[in-house]
Amino acid sequence: MNKNHITSDELINLLSNTINNSIYVVNDSIVDVFRYPDTNSERVTQTLFCQPLKIIDEIPEWSKVEVVDGYIGWIKSDKIDKSFTNITSTKVIIKSKLKNIYSTINTTSPIKEITLGTELYCISKTNNWYEVALPMNTIGWIEDNDTLQIQTGTHIPKTTGYELVETAKKFLGVPYLWGGVGAWGIDCSGLTYICCRVNGVDLPRDSQPQYNAISTSVEPNKKNMKLGDLVFFASKPGSNTVSHVGIYIGNNQFIHASSGAGLVTITSFSDNYYKKRLVGVKRVFEN
C-alpha cells in the first residue's frame, strides 16, 4: 500500500481538503497510522507533529488519510487539527533526537516534546530562539541548536554520508517498533527513511522500495564501501527479497533498528547471520 513519497510542501499543494486556506495537520508529537480503523490492526507507519495530511474518508472517531511518507491508513480523528493556517515563508527542521517546545522564551516547562525530522513553520527569531506556529492557532518557542532553517517550498540540502551516520547514531538504544519513525520507537526502514530525509535525500518508506529506488550499487567489501551506504538484507539466505536495511558506519559495521535485539544497535558487517542474507549495498551519498 506504500505509494510514492512526496515532501510536506508538495502534499500541501496537492491537498483537496483546504478550507479558507487552512490545511489539515497532525496535532500530537507522533501519531500511529493503522492499516484499518482499529488500534489492534497493523501500524503501517507514523506521522509527525504538524505534518500535513490529506483526509480521504471519515467514520466516527477515525479518519482515512494520506501522510507525507506516502502511506494511506487510518488515524484517530482527534489527532487532526483542521484549522491550521499559519504557513510561513520559512521552516525549521528538527535534527536532534528530541526537542522541547516551550510557551515562552527561557521557560523551564515544555508544552510539547517532538522528535527528529519534525518540520515547523517559523514566525520569527529572537536571539537563539525560534517562534514557531503550532496547531490550534497557537505558537511556541524552540531553541535553535541542532535545527536547520530552510525556505518553505525548498528541498532540505543534501549533506554527506558522514552526516547521515551521525544522525543515525542519535537513535542508538531507541526501542524497535514496527512502523515507527521517531525517538520513542523505530523500525529498520523508518531509521533510514527519517535519517536520509533530514540529510536531504527523500527515500520511500519501506526497505524493498528503498532498495529499488537507489540506482548506485556498491561491491560489498571494506575497500569499496563508504560511510552512509545502505546495506540491504533478506529474511532468508539466498533470497533477493529485501526485508531489512541498515546504514554502513565504517570499521566493517552498520547501524540498524533490529527486531531481534529489540532496539537500534550496531552490528558487524561480517556477522554470519547477516552475511548469509545480504542482498546488496546501495549508495545515496557520494561524499
Image (cartoon, helix red, strand yellow):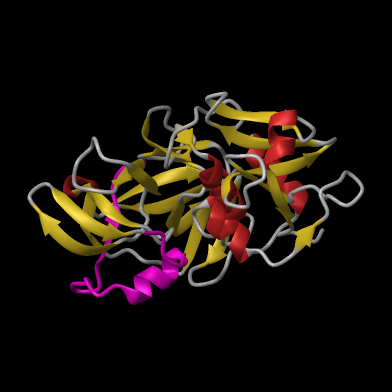
Q: Is residue 109 visible?
A: yes
Q: In which quarter of the image is the C terminus?
A: bottom right
| Front position in the image: 108 or 117 | 117
Identify which residue is drawn at 60% across, 39% down.
236
Identify which residue is drawn at 61% across, 53% down.
196
Find the magenta span and give its range.
1-29
Q: In the rendered view, would you say 248 is above or below 241?
A: above
Q: In the rendered view, would you say 102 is above or below 217?
A: above
Is 67 left, or right, of 176 in this rendering? left
Q: In which quarter of the image is the N terminus?
A: bottom left
Is 37 left, or right, of 142 in this rendering? left
| Front position in the image: 61 or 159 | 61
Q: In the rendered view, would you say 256 is above or below 91?
A: above
Is 52 left, or right, of 155 in this rendering? left
Main structural element of the magenta stretch: helix, strand or loop? loop
Image position, residue 70 (x, y; %): 41, 62
Identify which residue is drawn at 71% across, 58% down.
159
Q: In the rendered view, would you say 80 is above or below 236?
A: below
Is 242 left, or right, of 41 in this rendering? right
